[in-house]
């Protein structure tokens, strides 16, 4: 399940895409338009900034803006930055310990297939598609 952090990150990225033509977009404006808590947005932005998805400046005229074209952001990459994990089961999570049952697991193929379908779908959609 995608958390509110991931869903709100998508909303922030879309809002920036729609409003950055005038320069940097103040987060208070995004919070107001999206009806989100500014305090919560301040927790969502650091991982987006650390991963080079947005850039921000402080002071008069400050705010955030996207670092690349909206066609170059996949939904999958945004969610992977904001969510701890997208895998449907813990044994497929990145960095998970090898499962002792994997060789005899009757369901692993199903979970791997679901994981592939979800990730392929998320990686096939961009911010431009959502706009």
Image (cartoon, helix red, strand yellow):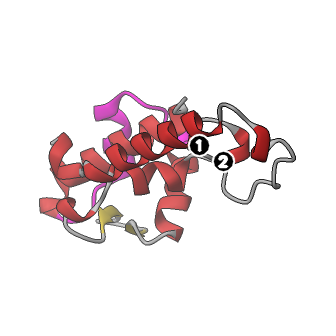
Residue 47 seen in the current view: yes
Seen from this angle, which residue lies furthest right? 100
Q: Main secondary structure of the magenta part?
A: helix
Whether residue 83 is situated above or below residue 4 in the rendered picture:
below
From the viewer's side, name the closer residue of 12 and 63: 12
Q: Is residue 48 left or right of residue 24?
A: right
- The residue located at (72%, 41%) in the rendering is 90
Q: Position of residue 21 (x, y in %)?
A: 12, 61
Residue 38 seen in the current view: no
- The residue located at (31%, 43%) in the rendering is 29
Helix or strand or loop: what does disc 1 sit on? loop
Q: In which quadrant will I find the C terminus?
A: top left
Label 1 – label 2 distance at C-alpha: 6 Å
From the viewer's side, name the closer residue of 70 and 105: 105
Q: Which residues are magenta?
A: 23-40
In magenta stretch: residue 32: yes
In magenta stretch: residue 11: no
Helix or strand or loop: what does disc 2 sit on? helix
Q: Residues within 10 Å of mark 2 (few under 14, many from 20)?
A: some
- The residue located at (24%, 52%) in the rendering is 126
Q: How many marks?
A: 2
Q: Position of residue 115 (x, y in %)?
A: 51, 42
Answer with the quarter of the image where residue 88 lies.
top right
Q: Residues within 10 Å of mark 1 (few under 14, many from 20)?
A: some
Q: In which quadrant will I find the N terminus?
A: top right
Which is more N-terminal, label 2 or label 1?
A: 1
Answer with the quarter of the image where residue 60 lies.
bottom left
Q: Is residue 84 left or right of residue 99?
A: left
Name the residue tied to disc 1.
87
Q: Position of residue 52 (x, y in %)?
A: 43, 72
From the viewer's side, name the closer residue of 70 and 110: 110
Residue 92's label in the rendered image is 2
């Amino acid at each position: 399940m995608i958390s509110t952090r991931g869903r709100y990150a998508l909303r922030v990225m879309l809002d920036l895409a729609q409003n950055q033509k005038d320069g940097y977009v103040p987060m208070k404006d995004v919070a107001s338009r999206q009806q989100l808590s500014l305090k919560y947005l301040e927790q969502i932005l650091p991982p987006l900034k650390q991963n080079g998805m947005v850039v921000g400046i402080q002071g008069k005229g400050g705010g955030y803006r996207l670092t690349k074209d909206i066609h170059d952001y996949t939904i999958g990459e945004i969610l992977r930055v904001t969510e701890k994990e997208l895998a449907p089961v813990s044994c497929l999570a990145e960095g998970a310990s090898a499962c002792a049952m994997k060789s005899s697991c009757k369901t692993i193929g199903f979970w791997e297939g679901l994981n592939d379908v979800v990730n392929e779908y998320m990686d096939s959609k961009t911010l431009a598609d959502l706009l």
